[in-house]
Amino acid sequence: MRTLVIGTGGREHALAWALSRDPGVSEVHAAPGNPGIAEVATLHDVDPMDGAAVADLARELGIDLVVVGPEAPLVAGVADAVRAAGIACFGPTRQAAQLEGSKAFAKDVMQVAGVPTASARVCETAEEAAAALDDLGAPYVVKDDGLAAGKGVVVTEDRQAALDHAAACGRVVIEEYLDGPEVSLFALTDGRTVYPLQPAQDFKRIGDGDQGPNTGGMGAYTPLPWAPDDLVDDVLRTVLQPTVDEMTRRGTPFAGLLYAGLALTSRGVRVIEFNARFGDPETQPLMALLDSPLSPLLYAAATGTLAAVPPPAWKPGAAVAVVMASKGYPESSSSGDVIDGVESLAGRDDVHVLHAGTARDAGGHLVTAGGRVLAVTAVGADIADARAKAYHGIEAISFPGAQWRTDIANGR
Ligand code: AMP
Ligand code: GLY
């Protein structure tokens, strides 16, 4: 099978890597990709937001399966354009991607489907926002209604800061604060059959001990030995299947990867958010532990035949990914800082450097080119082992202004 991965991030590197090791895959292409993806795929300089250009590229290359990684092209309808060209595409339609693209839409689907989530108000004016904050009480949770790459959410005890964020965003969702640990549970679905992946955990704040602003995610690990044994079954029954069924009932079936961001609260599991694509960086450790070939699962989800393929199987052990970010992240980012040491990890089976914001400068040196630069992803016998290997890898890599958390997968 010939495959084409759309995107430039660490998630796309992990997916392209898994496809490159899949015996059923003869070619892996990527657009636009990055220097790390170039090691496992042929890159094409095509705008990932341009559906017609992506469909043309797929046709020219004789692609059997396009995999759209990020949310922005999905919300822009790139998967629709590829399917309209008669090519199988993993990733939901523009309409179904509204589960991620609009928090208000997601809340409506959850309400109708009876999916447990934080109670919430959609607010368009300062008066509405103030009333909702006072009703729901502190800590305040204010979310930009649109796509914000994980950075549109403010959780604060400071009522003025909450009001300021609401004013800056315009239309916001203000919701009840959920306590308890967070879990990322992903599911492959073709709009009917739902196959959950192994649970993972992401570390969203920039600083150790979950301090500082939200980021796209600074590290992740899987599996979660502390999670209840029935968590996956419980979430499949109460969250994933009802959501998929409700989307199909509406005539906008969701096929692709449904990402449930969950809080395990004292009152049970609650959905924090849905995303319409694989999570980043959770995909990095998940792909490292996936034992099944990836292409049959993605192809079946894309073509309505998921029930005919066995559910995903997992290797024993654990995987941990630690993100290195550039100077200034998440408020800004730094480009052109020379990255040293990545080559020293080449050829390792248990430690992989998955690239996100990297580029080659005119001299061919690897340099930073974005906020989240790379994720060192390691596999081990258990979490402690995988974690030690990941941090060993981090120590081998350096660039000016590098930031990383030192507490990824370090207890809970
Ligand atoms: P979201 O973009 O909706 O995933 O929110 C980003 C992060 O903000 C989440 O991973 C949580 O850490 C935090 N957050 C979002 N909603 C809530 C909530 N209702 N209660 C507590 N924390 C939240
Ligand atoms: N890891 C968070 C996200 O992908 O949205």
Image (tube, rainbow, N blue to C red):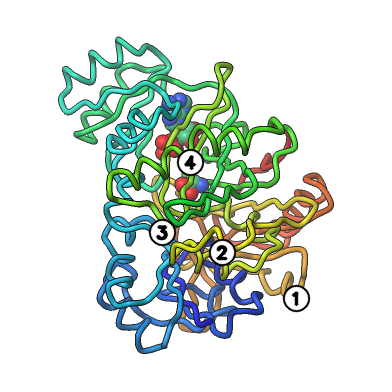
Residue 299 position in % (x across, y down): 50, 69
Give residue 347's mark: 1
- Whether ligand 1 has any atom under 8 Å from the Cβ at mark 4 is answered as no
C-alpha separation, residue under disc 1 versus residue under disc 3: 28 Å
Above or below, 297 against 248 in this view is below
Q: Residues within 10 Å of mark 3 (few under 14, many from 20)?
A: many
Which sits earlier in the primary sequence, circle 3 or circle 4? 3
C-alpha separation, residue under disc 2 versus residue under disc 3: 18 Å
Which sits earlier in the primary sequence, circle 2 or circle 3? 3
Q: Amino acid at mark 2?
A: Leu
Above or below, 13 against 189 in this view is below
Residue 359 position in % (x across, y down): 48, 73
Q: Residues within 10 Å of mark 2 (few under 14, many from 20)?
A: many
Of labels 3 and 4, the one closer to you: 4
C-alpha separation, residue under disc 4 versus residue under disc 1: 40 Å
The reply to whether the C-beta atoms of the residues labelled 2 and 4 are less than 8 Å apart is: no
Front-most of residues 129 and 178: 178
| Side of 224 relative to 170 (left or right) | right
Query: Residue 114's image quarter?
Result: top left
Q: Amino acid at mark 3?
A: Pro
Q: Which residue is mark 2?
A: 297
Q: Secondary structure at mark 1?
A: loop
Of labels 2 and 3, the one closer to you: 2
Give residue 241's mark: 4
Query: Residue 190's image quarter?
Result: bottom left
Q: Secondary structure at mark 3?
A: loop
Residue 158 position in % (x across, y down): 37, 17
| Residue at image point 58% right, 23% down | 180
C-alpha separation, residue under disc 2 versus residue under disc 4: 18 Å
Indicate the quadrant of ligand 1 in the picture.
top left
Q: Which residue is mark 3?
A: 70
Q: Residues within 10 Å of mark 1 (few under 14, many from 20)?
A: few
